[in-house]
Image (cartoon, grey):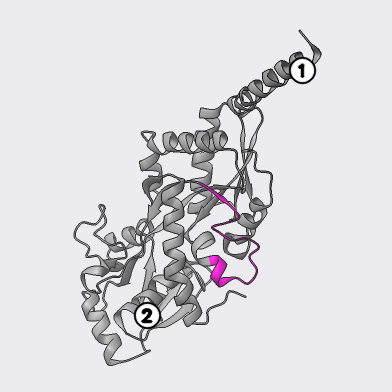
Amino acid sequence: MNHSRRHCLLGGLAAALLPRAAGAQEAAYPSRPLRFLVGFAPGGPADGVTRLFASRLQAQLGQTVIVENVPGAGSTLGVARLSKMAADGYAIGFAHTASLSIGPSLYKNVGYDPLKDLTPVAKVCEYVNVLAVRADSPWRSLADLLAAARSQPGTLSYGSAGIGSTNHLSGELLAAKAGVKLTHVPYRGTALAINDLMSGALQFVFDAPNSAGPLAAAGKLRLLAATGRSRHKLYPDLPAIAETVPDYEFRGWMGVVAPPGLPPGVHQRLTRELELAAAAPDTGKRLAALGLDVAFAGPQEMTRVIAAEIALWDPLIKSLNLSAQ
């Protein structure tokens, strides 16, 4: 065999082995611990969801999954840090409506483009808010509340966990869709707003079902409506806001993202493992305790949801001149 022919054969053999080598690398994933970033301090629903799925992934992948809390700037700080990390599947992060669909419009220079600088891996759950008034409120329906808002523009106030929070924007969306003027009062957490609602300083709040529901059952609050497009399965007798205000919908979500450029094999593996974790028998029960519903969706659907939400929230945030800085 002449030298040039042998060289060609060896070159062809090497080229043929390259895909196998790459496949072997991806097949060996993961071979070391994973880091799972969450943009909130320990405690609370986001941290709870992250730790639940981290424990599931750890068991399924056979590797340690270390949760890292990176609180700040409405969770955008953690997402920004993740977007600059190596795209090798060993760094993943928690993301939700606020960090990808609202935060980039609310915070100046968040440091990432939600549709370009991250790899969507999977959406794992969704949530709605409920509109609650005091149990002795004169309003027994959303129509009653809106009639009062129209007769006394700006006098009805509602509290939230802060500017740009989902319970704040649930109210702004209601004002915009129903054509009423409402006064927003931001707090450092929804619990403080609930206290002021109880004392009569506020007229209503938007809150998570798992915290407002027990207060309603105890006779301290009255639930008037839920923010989903249709009625929530836990509250079949509670009307959706859309039944009174057509085209109203707020349904938040939580999921997992990775840095941009994630290798396809690793990407598919992570999506598949998260789908398995979401389908585990007690996942729904654990999420329900946090006020959340299992709602798995893959990367394409996740991208579609983020784009649709940006189209909804960005104009509203700009029209209200909202800024968290």
Q: Which residues are magenta?
A: 103-120
* Viewer can see residue 203: no
Total numbered labels: 2
Q: Residues within 10 Å of mark 1 (few under 14, many from 20)?
A: few
| Quarter the N terminus occupies | top right
Q: Mark 1 and 2 residues: CB-CB less than 8 Å, in contact? A: no
> Residue at position x 48%, y 38% from top?
271
In the picture, the disc for residue 63 is none
Which residue is denoted by mark 1 in the rendering? 7
Q: Which residue of the protein is positioned furthest toward the right in this rendering?
A: 3
In the rendered image, residue 40, in percent from the top left (x then y), is placed at 58, 56
> As shown in the figure, which amino acid type bears the numbered disc 2?
Gly
Q: Main secondary structure of the magenta part?
A: loop
Element on which disc 1 rests: helix
> Residue at position x 61%, y 65% from top?
73
On screen, residue 90 versus residue 139, left or right, reads right
> As shown in the figure, which amino acid type bears the numbered disc 1?
His
> Residue at position x 51%, y 28% from top?
60
In the rendered image, residue 100, in percent from the top left (x then y), is placed at 52, 60
**In front of the other: 254 or 1:** 1
Q: Nearer the viewer, mark 1 or mark 2?
A: 1
